[in-house]
Amino acid sequence: MRLVDENGGQVGIKPTSEALEYAFSKNLDLVEVAGQADPPVCKVMDYGKYRYAEEQKAKLARKHQQQIHIKEIKLRPKIGVHDFETKKGHVVRFLNQRAKVKVTIMFRGRETTHPERGRDLLLRLAEDVKEIGQIESQPLLDGRNMVMLLGPTKAAGEKKADEEGEPSGEPTEPITAPAADGAAVEPSDTKEETETNA
């Protein structure tokens, strides 16, 4: 076998017994690193330390790996306005969470003869969320379903100041209640009048 020392230097081609003795004298392990080579390559190293370093590398790689989540929303071609707005709200929420959204239109019975209605609905949804979502897969008819995939844009997930409910800094005007004669009366005055009459 071709023997490599702990610093990566070439020791030379040695028989297995001699390589084992060399590793033993250094109080290290003999590890085969290239078994397919001719002759096989073995390295002298601390195997426990080597395994720990490899595990740390794998852990770091997993940490930096971005996971892609795909959420699914199902619609019907004859969906009502309010239901559409609710579903659109879900799509917006998912996109702001940096998830991809698979939007499915389910056709039943004779609805399959008008796939353009489903396509128009999907494109309308994509147009409504175009600021935070972009079409990654155009609407495609798959059996009785039509599917479209939306992906988040760079703007997805960013909160605007006006959406966070921050105070605008402008003074609020006092709330007035109408009196019997039509003149506006402060709420405190109304309370006092009630107490006096009582």
Image (tube, grey):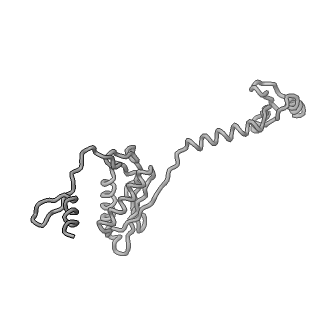
Q: In the drawing, does residue 120 fall left or right of residue 55?
A: left
Q: Is residue 15 visible?
A: no
Residue plotted at (81% across, 29% down): 3
Residue 55 in the image: state x and y as whole percent.
68, 41
Q: Quadrant of the C terminus?
A: bottom left
Residue 47 in the image: state x and y as whole percent.
78, 37
Residue 161 in the image: state x and y as whole percent.
33, 45
* Front in this rendered view, residue 181 or 59: 181
* Front in this rendered view, residue 21 or 186: 186
The image shows residue 99, relative to residue 117, as above or below, that is above
Q: Quadrant of residue 2?
A: top right
Q: In the drawing, does residue 104 fall left or right of residue 80?
A: right
Residue plotted at (24% across, 50% down): 172
* Front in this rendered view, residue 10 or 130: 130
Residue 75 in the image: state x and y as whole percent.
38, 66
The image shows residue 125, relative to residue 13, as above or below, that is below
Q: Quadrant of the N terminus?
A: top right
Q: Quadrant of residue 27?
A: top right
